[in-house]
Amino acid sequence: MTLRLENVSKSYDNVRAVQNISFSCESGTITGFIGPNGSGKSTTLRMIAGLTRLDEGSISIAGTRFQDLANPGREIGFLLDPSAHHPGRSVRETVGVAAIMMGLPFQRVDAAVESVGLAGAARRKVRSLSLGMRQRLSLAIALLGSPRYLVLDEPANGLDVEGMGWLKASIRAFVAGGGAVLISSHLLNELESYVDRVVIIDRGQVLSNSSMRELGRTDMTEVDGPERQKIQRILQAEGLVIVGGAGACVQPIQVASSPEQVGEILWRHGVQVSLLHRKQVESLESYYSELTSPEFAAVPAVKDER
Ligand SMILES: Nc1ncnc2c1ncn2[C@@H]1O[C@H](COP(=O)(O)OP(=O)(O)OP(=O)(O)O)[C@@H](O)[C@H]1O
């Protein structure tokens, strides 16, 4: 059971919002989806929901395109835009409309409203709800059809401390039941405490896709030598991501890979190396900062002049 994106691209006029990205979310796992503002997260999540058309590539939910799902709300739940609900409807009516669309009995509505802690606000109009309450309402609708997948765009926005704890517990319970969750967030310290995998995106491209376990073991390598441009060119040609120190920078080149791999590649190419050592990843936030830092990030591949 997999939510799979393969070579997905999307441009708006001349903005390349998403460029050839691929990753998948397996059942029983929580995948964090992180990146700077404007890096393409919402565009990607909206493409999964069929709200934004793909230019290229494919997205499938357990092998089926979203558009082809017979009853999408029973398969995959979305929390994309908490302000999308009609402001004049009550909480109960809003969930009720969703239940009708999914072909669910109205009896499910009160339980759903209660499960997200909104029983006391069931008759309040959406326009009078706080952002955190709208997030809870959106989650009630996302979970209403007992889907197997959940896609959440910044669900923690507007939640208080208790709300954050509740959100985490809800996501964990969903995954414990065999579901798969894809969640975007800027709260990296929070995210680190409960995701299984993390996909880092910047300028529409996936920079890193690894499990938290792998990330803990992921080595950043610092490497340098008299032929710095050549080192950069060779490592990029071998598919490694340079995260800093390239070009004319005075710092060593930083590579998102192990020193063993970097050393083996450079040895194979006969390049002289003056420095090669491991730089440990301390936290998701520090790893993310290294990958996406404006001075260093997405170091463009140097042209192969050979
Ligand atoms: N409807 C649109 N029309 C034109 N450009 C758009 C549209 N939606 C997004 N973009 C552009 O696509 C790029 C990616 O935007 P997107 O909203 O996917 O980023 P994001 O990672 O979700 O950002 P944030 O963290 O700020 O929510 C940005 O350059 C944005 O300006």
Image (spheres, grey):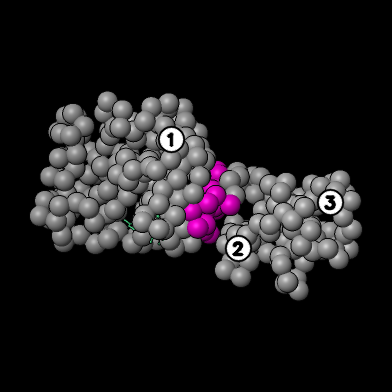
Report if the CB atoms under discs 3 and 1 are less than 8 Å apart. no
Q: Amino acid at mark 3?
A: Leu
Residue type at mark 1: give it: Ser
Where is 242 relative to 67, above or below?
A: below
Whole-percent x, y for residue 16 in the image: 44, 55
Other residues around mark 2 within 10 Å, as few (<14) / some (14–19) / many (≥20) = many
Q: How many marks?
A: 3
Residue furthest to the bottom: 250
Residue count near mark 3 (Cα–Cα under 10 Å), binned few <14, some 14–19, many ≥20: some
- Residue drawn at 41 percent across, 48 percent down: 10
Q: Is mark 2 within 8 Å of ligand 1?
A: no
For marks 3 and 1, the one nearer the N-term is 1
Near-viewer residue (138 or 11): 11
Q: Amino acid at mark 2?
A: Ala
The answer to whether residue 120 is seen in the rendering is no
Disc sitting over residue 266 in the figure: 3
Instruction: Please say if 49 is above or below 189.
Output: above
Q: Secondary structure at mark 3?
A: helix
Residue carrying label 1: 58
SS for callout 2: loop
Q: How far across and down, in percent of the image, does residue 248 sit?
A: 73, 71
**Marks 2/3: CA distance?**
22 Å
The residue at the point 49 percent across, 37 percent down is: 6
Q: Which residues are magenta?
A: 188-207
Give the CA separation, mark 3 to mark 1: 36 Å
Instruction: Indicate which quadrant contains ligand 1.
Output: bottom left
Indicate the position of residue 265 as horizontal and vertical percent values.
81, 47
